[in-house]
Amino acid sequence: MSSPLTHSSARVLEFEALRELLRAYTASPLGQAKIAALTPSTDSSWINEQQELTGEVREFRRVGGRFDFSGLLDVTRLIEKARISGAALETTEIRDVLLLVDRAAEWHEIALHPPASMRTAWKRVGTLSASIPDFTEFLRHFRNKIEPDGTLEDRASPELARIRREIEKQRRGIQESLRDI
């Protein structure tokens, strides 16, 4: 991020109105937080980097490139919670982390293999995206184990599948007993 100005003409230049306009185009709480943190700057190298990034992303969009940023949450608190010995994340919290990780992995693939019809190279996007780790093994471990509503799939583990089969068997037995009575 750039170094903020101590005194600026942001009010006169309606910087807050610009920030509100940008915030209206964001599709996630994470993006809205990033926009809220924007401040005017005189750091010309940071400004040039942002202009180059914008140009590269505009080119990506021009050739039909798409990426869904909606619903991305800041999972920092959840990751900190998961680091606490003995603490456990709820399945809905794990689902939120997985959504962010899945989108990061998707963007990483896009950054590695941009559309061939792009006229410009991904110099800035590539540099920015290079720090995204490879989440393949992590995602493979959790794939198809958590439903969108946060419940665990029966196939999440063999033990869970066995327990749920046993519960269903007992439920049927109880219902048959009640019908007999």
Image (cartoon, rainbow, N blue to C red):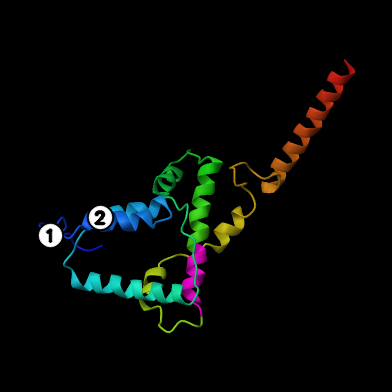
Q: Quadrant of residue 46?
A: bottom left
Could you say whether the residue bearing mark 2 is in a helix, strand or loop?
helix
- Indicate the position of residue 78 as horizontal and vertical percent values: 44, 45
Classify residue 1 as left or right of residue 107.
left
Residue occupied by mark 1: 9
Magenta includes 146? Answer: no
Which residue occupies the extreme left position in the image? 7
Please tell me whether residue 113 is drawn above or below residue 100 in the rendered image: below
Residue occupied by mark 2: 17
Classify residue 138 as left or right of residue 118.
right
Which residue occupies the extreme right position in the image? 180
Could you say whether the residue bearing mark 1 is in a helix, strand or loop?
loop
Classify residue 146 as left or right of residue 50.
right
Instruction: Look at the image and give the residue range highlighted in magenta.
Output: 105-115
- Indicate the position of residue 96 as horizontal and vertical percent values: 50, 48
Q: Looking at the picture, tell me which residue is in the foreground, 46 or 152.
A: 46
Q: Nearer the N terminus, badge 1 or badge 2? A: 1
Q: Residue at left 35%, top 53%? A: 32
Q: Residue at left 19%, top 72%? A: 44
